[in-house]
Image (cartoon, grey):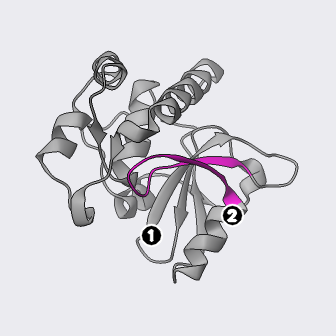
Amino acid sequence: MATTAQRAHLVAVLDFFHRHASHLLYPPHDVRTWRDNECWHWSEQTTEHVLENGGYWQGDCSEFCPTALRFAGLWPYRQPGATSSHLTMLPVYLDAKEAFAGSLVVFGGGGGHHEAIVHTPDHRYGNPLLASHGRPGFDLVRLKDLAASQAAEGFPGVRLLSIAHL
C-alpha cells in the first residue's frame, strides 16, 4: 500500500527533477538507448550526485515515471516497462478527483501516447498538477492543459492509473 510518507518522498523526488530540468534528456527520436538503461539502474543517490554535479539523466516518459516511483519505494518491478504495459499492470480509472500524488496519467487511446505523473492532487476540481517528461526538460502542468495539448496533437483521451497497491 502506498503510504503518505512514500507519496511525500515522491513529490520531493519530482521537485528535485524539476530543479534540474535542464539536465533531463529525452531519447533521440523517442528510441531508448544505452543511456536510458544506465540511468534506469542508478540509485536515487547516484542520480542526485550526477545531476547536482552537472551530469545528465536520460529516459522517456514511461521510464521517468517509474524512476520517480522507484526512488520513493513504489515501483516493485525490475524494469520500467512502457506506457502500454503500465495500462495492463495497474488499475485504470477515469475520475481525476480521485488521483493522489504518484498516480500515473496516460494520454491517448489504445496503448497510450504520453504518460505523466500526479505531483499535486486536486480532489475538488479534478485538475491535478502533473510532472511531465515528454521532451528534453521537465514540465509542471495542469491535467486539463496537457490533455488539451495532447488532443490538439491527435491524441485525445485521459486514463489514470492507480499506484495504491504497489
| Residue 95: % across, % down | 73, 59
Front one among 106 and 48: 48
Q: Distance between the residues labelled 1 and 2?
A: 17 Å
| Residue 22: % across, % down | 41, 40
Rendered residue at 57%/39% (across/down): 102
Secondary structure under tag 2 reads: helix
On whether residue 61 falls in the magenta region, the answer is no
Q: Do the residues labelled 1 and 2 touch (CB within 8 Å)?
A: no
Secondary structure under tag 1 reads: loop
In magenta, the rendered stretch is 128-143
| Image quarter hosting the N terminus | top right
Residue farthest toward the right in the current orientation of the protein: 124
Question: Is 58 drawn above or below residue 158 in the view shown?
Answer: above
Dot 1 amino acid type: Gly
Question: Is 12 drawn above or below residue 113 in the view shown?
Answer: above
Rendered residue at 38%/52% (across/down): 136
What residue sits right under mark 1 in the picture? Answer: 112
Residue 145, labelled with which disc?
2
Residue farthest toward the left in the current orientation of the protein: 34
Q: Which of the two discs, 1 and 2, sits closer to the camera?
A: 2
On whether residue 133 falls in the magenta region, the answer is yes
